[in-house]
Amino acid sequence: MAPKQQPRRQSITVSRGARKRDEDAGTEVGEGTDEWAQSKATVRPPDQLELTDAELKEEFTRILTANNPHAPQNIVRYSFKEGTYKLIGFVNQMAVHYSQVGNLIPKDSDEGRRQHYRDGLMAGSQESAKVIASETELLEEEGPKEAEAEAGSQTDVPAAEAAEKVTEEELITPKQPEERKLTNQFNFSERASQTFNNPLRDRECQMEPPPRANFSATANQWEIYDAYVEELEKQEKTKEKEKTKTPVAKKMGKMAMRKMTSVESQSDDITKVTQAAKIVERMVNQNTYDDIAQDFKYYEDAADEYREQEGTLLPLWKFQNDKAKRLAVTALCWNPKYKDLFAVGHGSYDFVKQSRGMLLFYSMKNPSFPEYIFSSDSGIMCLDIHVDHPYLVVVGHYDGNVAIYNLKKPQSQPAFRSSAKSGKHTDPVWQVKWQKDDMDNNLNFFSVSSDGRIVSWTLVKSELVHTDVIKLKVEGSTKEGQDGLQLHTVGCGTAFDFHKEIDDMFLVGTEEGKIYKCSKSYSSQFLDTYDAHNMAVDAVSWNPYHTKVFMSCSSDWTVKIWDHTIKTPMFIYDLNSAVGDVAWAPYSSTVFAAVTTNGKTHVFDLSINKYEAICNQPVVARKKNKITHVQFNPIHPIIIVGDDRGHVTCLKLSPNLRKMPKEKKGQDVQKGPAVEIAKLDKLLNLVREVKPKI
């Protein structure tokens, strides 16, 4: 190898010398390169590939990645879902080249504070040792001088010993440096606070845990196959049923059949959840309206203690539904069994703009959404709920029909409905009332309409059978027509109410302002006639306690209280606006409420004030809204008020509006119907005594 490499070294040295001479001579850069290239000999290994110019010019790009070259790429795990071994796509590529456990300690930690304190002690002990050493040197220098000057004095001996003791003690226990107080820290307080912090209190509610059960199962392929087979069999059965049905049944639309099949397929899933979902919805609403629920249960207006003859109404919930937004509230009725449930009838009092109607049922446990929704083609003008069967609701429509809805059936259509063949009214039905069952225990109700007919409806074998009880005629309006025929002007009935004890007797109010006392037994003659009002009678209601007293209201702005044995009213109240509805309170014979079209609710208590209302309160915010109906709750001290915008407002009566007899020490307060009757009798006797003098 040495002889071969020797000439190469020479050539290299020659070229270097030549370049040096060129640089010294001042030649240009680049000269002499040919000589260097000619003298250079390339050495190639014997197995080197011979590449062409095109192959040499070809570029190869390489991408550097952060993948670990030693990480395995073929890890396989068993998949229980697919039953095979599967490659794992993601492999951890991190490679740790260097790691070291740190020994740093935070300054704010306990260990850091202890170390800092220990370092301070060591530094303080070193400084104190230096100071003591310098002091001992000074004492050694001054000691011989003082000993020579005061030789024989014994007082210096104990001083030297004391100095030695002090230095020894200081050496043993060095001075501890004072810890500097750090301000502007997070746990720093400059001055104490004088305020009293109330202790936190938790209110918790504990309930019985719901029943639990563990369930586990595996869905195999054959189980899934069996489920599909069962579903196919069900579909085939439904198709066979459709084929075997009669031609009349085939008239039902395809959409209805599709809905039925979808309901059947979903019934298994939905029925299990509906009850639980309803309970959860009520719980959520109870939390949402918790403050209102607390007011409903516990709030009492404390200002009533300082007011003897005045009261207030506290607004609670507001019930409304988007579907009934533009419909007026035409009827209100509490359910006789479920005291938190009430029915609302929606229609329109604007006879030019008549459209649809709705029947909604609201519960105070869920103010945000109705419990039941029924829609009708004609507006609902009145309704009543059966006392013994609280799931049966009778309604009267604007088109003269009456219908019965059954809440137990989920259908949106009424269970029974009148028709032109079955004797429906020709004018709007203004009021309906359930009555006692007939001799054959058939359901029975009455209706009154503007066509002057009072009709008794009986449910016989799933059909509504009607009988006209009486036809209203305006007295003194009989005219003789051609051929000596007598023509009578028909009275338009607007409201009626049945006596609480005498089954046959009832009162009827008319558009002419008169009130007729009628009997079911006499269809051609009235028992009595009262010239009550100057305009249409909007409501007539018997007192729930006193059998002789009834009340009426009218659009002529007045509310009148009557004794049915006397043709003149006992009390007359002018409310400065058309009165839409009146209602007696269920807890007192002398308390009643009236609503007017100017948006106010008036509450009267005759035992407190015989001349004016003890509460006149606006309930509707806007002046355009008119209040149409009012009803007292049977057991709770609240009223519900409906307006012509479809809203129902619930209001709580303050203590002054429901005053009960005061309890005296050692005496039992008498309560009951007898006390209420005596209280109203006392007022009526006062009025009867005063009237002859006037």
Image: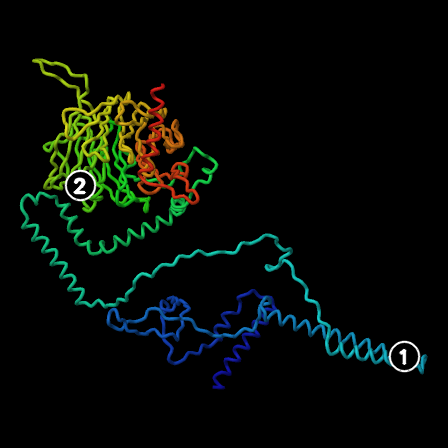
Residue 375 picture location, percent across and down: 22, 39
In this view, the residue farthest toward the front is: 666
The residue nearer to you, when weighing 411 against 189, is: 411
Residue 580's label in the rendered image is: none
Secondary structure of the residue carrying numbered label 1:
loop
Q: CA distance from mark 2 to mark 1?
A: 127 Å
Quarter of the figure with residue 268: bottom left
The residue nearer to you, when weighing 182 against 447, is: 447
Which of the colour schemes (rainbow, by chain, secondary structure, one colour) is used?
rainbow
Secondary structure of the residue carrying numbered label 2:
loop
* Residue lying at 36% horizontally and 24% vertically, measured from the top left: 576
Residue 191 visible to the viewer = yes
* Image side of residue 622 versus residue 193, left or right: left
Q: Which quadrant does the C terminus fall into? A: top left
* Residue lying at 28% horizontally and 73% vertically, measured from the top left: 78
Q: Residues within 10 Å of mark 2 (few under 14, many from 20)?
A: some
Question: Mark 2 is on which residue type?
Answer: Gln
Give the residue at mark 2: 413
Residue 155's label in the rendered image is: 1
Quarter of the figure with residue 234: bottom left
In this view, the residue farthest toward the bottom is: 2
